[in-house]
Amino acid sequence: MEVKEGEYYLSALMNSINEFYQDKLNLLKIDFQIEKYLDCLLNGDVDRAVQVLQNIIENAIKYGDGHSIYIKFSEEEDCCLITIKNTGCSLPDNEVPHIFESFWRGSNVGEKNGSGLGLYICRQLMKQMGGDIFGYSKNGIMEITVVFCRA
């Protein structure tokens, strides 16, 4: 998992995500919204950042109820936080702390394929880029927040 040091604009990251998912989610009839944001310069590897967000969105598609995926933005100190929310989370609250562990899969996976490595890899990539990732679930809404450091 090589991470290249560099800088990129938030808009480059979000344009890539929007281009990749807008049509796909429209075909799946999943309401997909990206909140308005102020562009800023971020530290890290834009390709790995795209990989992290794509993994989270793919999980939202796979484990959500197919109604909506929403991306919102916030700021904290010198960081840009991107939160991906999806409806229909059936993961029990006591399992949420384990979602970033390697080879761990929740009790809600059913027959869905997977290795339990996706979110673990996301955390490793974010740590290499000086950021972080964490998750939260409440009332059937899953939120995964990715912390990117500003340049």
Image (spheres, rainbow, N blue to C red):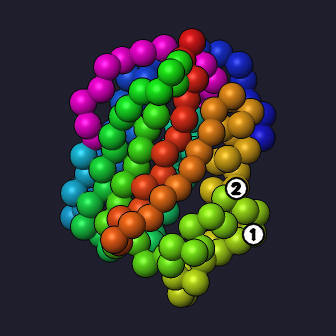
Q: Is mark 2 on a helix, strand or loop?
A: helix
Under tag 1, what secondary structure?
Answer: loop
Which residue position is annotated with label 2?
A: 120
Q: Which residue is drawn at 65% across and 75% down?
A: 105
Image vertical order of residue 38 relative to residue 56, above or below: above
Residue 115 is left or right of residue 111, and the answer is: right
- Residue 46 forms part of the magenta stretch: yes
Q: Around disc 1, counting alpha carbons within 10 Å, would you say few (fewer than 14), some (14 to 19), or many (20 or more)?
A: few
Image coordinates for residue 136, horizontal then vertical, percent: 48, 59
Q: Does the magenta stretch include residue 141?
A: no
Q: In this view, does 79 lie above or below 69?
A: above
Label 1 belongs to which residue?
103
The residue segment tinted magenta is 34-47
Q: Residues within 10 Å of mark 2 (few under 14, many from 20)?
A: some
Q: Are marks 1 and 2 in contact (CB under 8 Å)?
A: yes
Q: Look at 39% across and 66% down and name the residue there.
A: 138
Disc 1 marks which amino acid? Phe
Look at 24% across and 30% down and name the residue there.
36
Q: Which mark is residue 89?
A: none
Q: List x then y, in percent, for residue 90.
A: 43, 78
Upstream in sequence: badge 1 or badge 2 = 1
Give the quarter of the image for residue 17: top left
Residue 9 position, x and y percent, is: 46, 17
